[in-house]
């Protein structure tokens, strides 16, 4: 199978150097050929498994409680200012 | 070697009889880590000060008359389980500086029980790998032979238990990541039923497959630890609300009349003959104890592997979308605008295996391929579950190898597919959400540990543990320990 690794990488927000494109195409093709063996099975009319145990609508009580302090959450931010995350400008 | 060699059970008795204090036990482990971990490389972070404070607190609780199986016991934690105030890296550059603002539920439970966290353990990056070689930080060595990998992804957790660098450890298992390293390092490793142990605070790899579980020296310790970490948690909507038994009280019971199935697909080509022999020897042992063993068939075994790599990669590609350099962790230094910041951060922050899984998962979920891959894998999942439930109508447990081979050398499996093939005995269990345990079954001719696996039906951990305990007590393999040489 011919896989458009540049397209997949763009969807996944990964950068692939031109020099690595061939390596990635080949590796992806090998792994997908490996997974293609699922086609040996007849899966017509087989339901997909979506969860291990049927758990219906898990709700919690609507009680108010303390939230995490803002400083504690922001402590891990690579860049912050005045209690906000800082990201590169997106609107000119 | 001193008190570090004791089991959790033995240490706990000595602590409660006040023969030793938790501070003494903790210091002994910290000293041993200083001496031997430069060789084994099992820890990413050692938290000496915090550990000694927790040990003092445990000693106060013991002095006040409190009793408890984990009170004052040193534990090591896989570095994908969040610990408040202690760096939790997932062995990735992406989270090299991440300090969680909260504890995972299992950590809260361990702290409430008085366990002493001594440090955070190495692993494959984001738990993706089977040798701990994909860690951004270091290569953990197998305590039995430092030229061998410890297995993975919980390689640090398995090596630390085996080398007595923690009394017990926690790992996580998405496709064998507790059981396979336990087998490679001669430890006991349990992957609990999906939903038995809360995943809150476990950094997600593949949410429908991940489970946290214990790695221990003995089956008895494993039962003891499970009792403390299992239980419903409202912070994990997939956690199941059932009563948690005292798993240790199931041990030592009569196993006569129990029925054990031996699926022939797990003993076919590609299984190292000495491992196959270990399984057949275990059959004889179980028969001598009065259990009924019979060959059976799980025809879809090999397909579980293909379905696993699609499902786990698809879920990973979604779960790892959150690493964008905005809220926590690594951010690239040079970029042009927001999109480029995402691209640079993710391309520099993730290692090659993680990128490979994200790419595969993104492909399997992408428009035009979803039906052919992800949907198909989820259908195969239904068939695999059916295969197992048919078996459990007839058998109390299934007996298989944990791994097709014993531990391999660093760099030996450079090709991703050859690495993936090594998971063939473990992944089906996660696909079906079942509990399974790996236990030591002696050494092969090259003196590498062999692990064998028991699988039970959902929430039948008691059955699993009592069968494993009977085997361990009959064989005495619990007493096998590696011979560590300082500076070797």
Image (cartoon, rainbow, N blue to C red):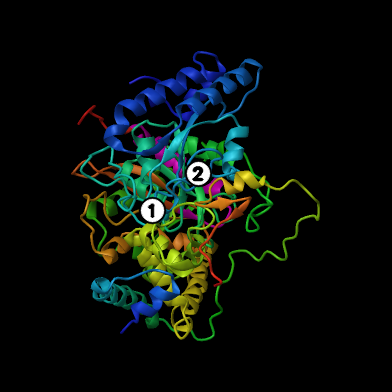
Task: Return the chain for callout 2.
Answer: B
Task: Return the chain for callout 1.
Answer: B
Residue neighbourhood size for the residue with mark 1, other residues' Cα within 10 Å, grouped as few (<14), some (14–19), many (≥20): many
The C terminus of chain B sits in image quarter:
top left
Q: Is B10 within the magenta? A: no
Q: Are marks 1 and 2 on the same chain?
A: yes
Residue B206 sits above or below residue B378 on the image:
above
Which secondary structure class fits the magenta region best? helix
Tally of numbered discs: 2
Q: Which mark is residue B465?
A: 2
Which residue is tagged 1? Answer: B125
Q: Magenta segment, which residues? A: B455-479
Residue at point 30%, 51% (across, down):
B133
Residue neighbourhood size for the residue with mark 2, other residues' Cα within 10 Å, grouped as few (<14), some (14–19), many (≥20): many
Q: Nearer the viewer, residue B474 or B411?
A: B411
**Residue B295: in sight, yes or no?**
no
Residue B153 place in picture, x, y as percent: 38, 51
């Amino acid at each position: 199978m011919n896989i458009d690794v540049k397209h997949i990488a763009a969807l996944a927000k990964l950068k692939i150097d031109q020099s690595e494109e061939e390596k990635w195409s080949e590796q992806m093709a090998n792994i997908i050929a490996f997974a293609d063996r699922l086609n040996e099975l007849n899966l017509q009319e087989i339901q997909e498994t979506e969860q291990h145990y049927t758990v219906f609508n898990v709700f919690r009580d609507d009680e108010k409680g303390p939230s995490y302090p803002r400083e504690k959450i922001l402590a891990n931010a690579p860049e912050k200012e005045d209690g906000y995350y800082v990201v590169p400008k997106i609107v000119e | 070697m001193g008190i570090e060699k004791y089991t959790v059970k033995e240490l706990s008795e000595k602590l409660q009889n006040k023969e030793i204090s938790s501070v003494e036990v903790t210091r002994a482990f910290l000293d041993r880590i200083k001496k031997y971990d430069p060789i084994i490389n099992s820890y990413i972070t050692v938290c000496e000060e915090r550990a000694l404070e927790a040990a003092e607190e445990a000693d106060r609780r013991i002095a006040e008359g409190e009793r408890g199986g984990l009170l004052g016991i040193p534990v090591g934690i896989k570095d994908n389980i969040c610990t408040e105030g202690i760096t939790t890296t997932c062995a990735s550059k992406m989270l090299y500086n991440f300090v969680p603002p909260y504890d995972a539920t299992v950590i809260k439970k361990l702290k409430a029980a008085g366990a002493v966290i001594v440090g955070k353990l190495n692993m494959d990056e984001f738990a993706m790998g089977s040798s701990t070689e994909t860690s951004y930080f270091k290569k953990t060595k197998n305590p039995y032979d430092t030229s061998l990998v410890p297995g993975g992804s919980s390689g640090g957790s398995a090596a630390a238990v085996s080398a007595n660098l923690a009394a017990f450890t926690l790992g996580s298992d998405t496709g064998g990541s507790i059981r396979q390293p336990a087998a490679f390092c001669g430890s006991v490793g349990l992957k609990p039923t999906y939903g038995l142990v809360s995943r809150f605070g476990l950094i997600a790899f593949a949410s429908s497959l991940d489970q946290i579980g214990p790695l221990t020296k003995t089956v008895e310790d494993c039962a003891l630890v499970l009792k403390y970490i299992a239980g419903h948690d409202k912070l994990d909507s997939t956690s199941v609300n059932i009563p948690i038994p005292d798993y240790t009280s199931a041990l030592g019971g009569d196993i006569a009349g129990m029925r054990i199935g031996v699926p022939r697909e797990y003993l076919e080509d590609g299984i190292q003959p000495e491992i196959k022999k270990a399984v057949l020897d275990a059959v004889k042992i179980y028969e001598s104890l009065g259990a009924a063993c019979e060959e059976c068939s799980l025809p879809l075994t090999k397909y579980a592997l293909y379905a696993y790599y699609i499902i786990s990669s698809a879920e990973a590609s979604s779960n790892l979308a959150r690493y964008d350099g905005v809220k926590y962790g690594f951010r690239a230094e040079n970029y042009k605008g927001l999109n480029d910041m995402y691209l640079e951060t993710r391309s520099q922050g993730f290692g090659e295996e993680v990128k490979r899984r994200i790419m595969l998962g993104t492909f399997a979920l992408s428009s035009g391929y979803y039906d052919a891959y992800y949907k198909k894998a989820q259908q195969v999942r239904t068939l695999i579950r059916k295969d197992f439930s048919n078996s459990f109508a007839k058998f109390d447990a299934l007996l298989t190898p944990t791994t097709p081979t014993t531990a391999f050398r660093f760099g030996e499996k450079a090709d991703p597919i050859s690495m993936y093939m090594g998971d063939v005995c473990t992944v089906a269990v996660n696909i079906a959400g079942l509990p399974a345990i790996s236990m030591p079954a002696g050494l092969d001719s090259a003196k590498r540990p062999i692990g064998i696996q028991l699988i039970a039906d959902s929430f039948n951990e008691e059955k699993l543990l009592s069968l494993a305990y009977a085997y361990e007590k009959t064989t005495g393999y619990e007493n096998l320990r590696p011979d560590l040489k300082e500076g070797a």
